[in-house]
Image (tube, helix red, strand yellow):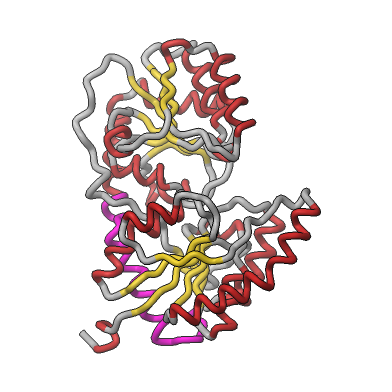
Amino acid sequence: MSEQDTQAVRVLQILFDDRFGGPQKRIFQSIAGLAERGVHVIVALPDRAGNAHVIAREKGIETRITKMAKIPRPSKIFDVLRWLFTLPGELLALVRLIREVRPDVVTVNGAILVVPALAAKLAGVPVMINFNDTSLSENLARLFGWLDRKLANLIVCQGDGVARHYGLERGQYICVYSAVDIAQFYPRQPIQQRTLRAGLIANWNPIKDIENFLEAARQTAQREPSLHFVLAGPKIDTQPEYAERIEHNIAAAALGDRLTVVGAVQDVPAFMNTLDIVVMCSLREGCPNVVLEAMACGRPVVATDVGCVRELLDWEGEPGGIVVPVRDPARLGDALREIAHDAVRRERLGNRGRALAQERYSLDAHVACYVTLYREMARRRGLTIL
């Protein structure tokens, strides 16, 4: 092993959301493995009231708190103007932070975070930008894709589907899927039950399209008595109107004891293993953790065709689940019935998903890939590596 391969690399990870979610989970779970391979990660979080910094410190992760104002909705003109006014101060604060931390690489998590990327360039530190989602409209996504190509030394996308959303072509990015800790997510002995449980695990957020799941459940319950439906996940303080809408939809669906609603799930692997089918019906996603976790647990997945879901489930022609169109409860219900009626297919899809999770999406493979990228960026400091 060369001296270059053993030299420690310092990485500053900049996260925009103060709430613990998918990107935070992906990064936090990889930090210990990166440290074992000589990559020390410091996480920068915005000075807002979310829980991400608390969870980071509970896990022993070195953190920094810095100015990063929440980006307002474009329709709120006054808020947009006030936000624009804060950007110069935010930029200077980030430059000071980068110079204080003295990282070898700055990683920016989100295509819209051009201010942190610009701060890294001003501080003279190579910058990696991770494209994690497909939440932007097509026109905005392509604008930020173009802008980020000007700022980044390396762009990493969580799938080819994510890259296409931002207008990136092969050779302009490296594809690194998210990861699942297969030591935690693995098949366990299912609870013996007469009915099959099809479950959606999601925050009560409009992009999760819980309405679609409830409507599919309503339609399917009339024709498939063997299925019981489960809705798991917490309501979000910032989405009270959506929570009210979902509660109304639950009442309107009149599923009675055919639907179980639970709140936040503390032990996700154990809960996922009580399900026979895992559903994801989001309107937009990048590389959704819940799909990878279901695959690792050996559970067949029915998921909407967003982000890189099709890539995850349908590798080399043998699928680990069924992909359905967005906002199509009839097709979602059909897929659930197809799996419910065919125990052999359920087992085959689950086994294939588990194999894919082990072979392609393990945490070890994910960490090894980033170690290689960070070392290469540190070695070629200031140069674009694509």
Q: Is residue 366 left or right of residue 248?
A: left
Q: Position of residue 351 (x, y in %)?
A: 26, 40
**Residue 197 in view, yes or no:** yes
Q: Residue at x 26, y 17 (%)?
A: 193
Q: Position of residue 350 (x, y in %)?
A: 30, 37
Q: Residue at x 45, y 86 (%)?
A: 381
Q: Residue furthest bottom?
A: 3
Q: Main structural element of the magenta stretch: helix, strand or loop?
A: helix
Q: Nearer the viewer, residue 84 or 275?
A: 84
Q: Is residue 32 magenta?
A: no
Q: Position of residue 101 (x, y in %)?
A: 44, 78
In the displayed structure, 54 sits above or below 370; it is above
Q: What span is colored magenta in the figure?
A: 357-386
Q: Nearer the viewer, residue 273 or 313?
A: 273
Name which quarter of the figure residue 162 lies in.
bottom right
In the displayed structure, 284 sits above or below 142; it is above
In the displayed structure, 348 sits above or below 318; it is above
Q: Quadrant of the N terminus?
A: bottom left
Q: Position of residue 131 (x, y in %)?
A: 53, 61
Q: Is residue 85 left or right of residue 167?
A: right
In the displayed structure, 339 sits above or below 126; it is above
Q: Residue at x 42, y 14 (%)?
A: 258
Q: Is residue 384 magenta?
A: yes
Q: How many marks?
A: 0
Q: Residue at x 74, y 66 (%)?
A: 85
